[in-house]
Amino acid sequence: MIGIDGKEYPVPTHEQLQEVFARNKELVDRKMRQGFTQLQLTPIAMPASRLIGLMRSAIVRHAAEGLIYQTRRSPSDPLVPVRVNAEKQVWLWDTLEQALDGDDLVYFPQEYSSNHRGQTKLEVVNSRRICAVPGWSVGLVEDSRIMPEQGQGKTLGGRRQLEVGHSPREYLQTLQTEAYEGETGQILEDFITDFLTHLETTNEVSSDVKDHNALWCLGQYLRISYAEVVPTGRWVRDVGRVRLDMHRTGNKVCTKNWGVSSTVRLGT
């Protein structure tokens, strides 16, 4: 891929991934016992606007082929087609669009405030702690398409699964506790990559708000004139498209339908 800095970033090789996993063996073993069993490769260096374009094109193609369905909880569930908006397949809030790939959008904040201690996108691209392979985040995620409702999360290896129903600020505080060591919130690049991967491999959409499965992108933060906000990603079944916008970090209104997926990023 071509990154925001104009440099080329080849897809990680099998040998590179083996080396990353070997260097992080203790963390990998512990997190796999906690349910993080699926590899996630995120092209963080790629402009987010380019990723959004790829997602839009994939949705259009699947709709034209008649191969786009609701998220299934189990492979044995029936396939239920979804409608796709003919005019706009991805709705992007203009304030977020203006911030994409710029220095104002903070990556991996430690708190949602002026003392965020986060990084810019370009700093993250050049950080081997986040991008173990140049330009690429090598991570582990839970192998589940639907986030658990409140009271339904399982405890694996001393870690309780993150459940739907809390504000971004509450989730960020939770991720900083001992049981969640090594995890970060997801960023828009993670959300889009995951959406694309799942669509291409199963013909299913992801993060359907009707399933109480919309995603807070905890790993990003923006200060605007009237609020501190984080991005969100979701499929809106009623209108047939992905919606990318932002909500306040203390938002308690949307918590019934919103939750968090975290990523264990393997550094070098």
Image (cartoon, rainbow, N blue to C red):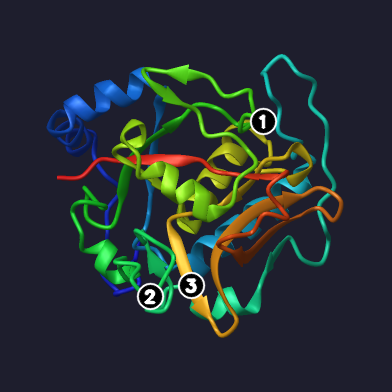
Residue 8 visible somewhere in the drawing: no
Residue type pointed to by label 2: Ser
Mark 2, residue position: 114
Residue type pointed to by label 1: Glu
Q: Secondary structure at mark 3?
A: strand
Of residue 96 and residue 11, the one placed in the foreground of this image is 96
In whole angstroms, how far apart are the C-alphas of marks 2 and 1?
32 Å
Where residue 176 sits: x, y (%)?
35, 45
Residue type pointed to by label 3: Leu
Vertical order, 127 against 204 (above or below): below
**Viewport quadrant of the N terminus:** bottom left
In whole angstroms, how far apart are the C-alphas of marks 3 and 1?
27 Å
Disc 1 packing (10 Å; few <14; some 14–19; many ≥20):
some
Q: Do labels 3 and 1 touch, CB within 8 Å?
A: no
The reply, left or right, for residue 200 in relation to residue 112 is right
Disc 3 packing (10 Å; few <14; some 14–19; many ≥20):
many
Mark 3, residue position: 222
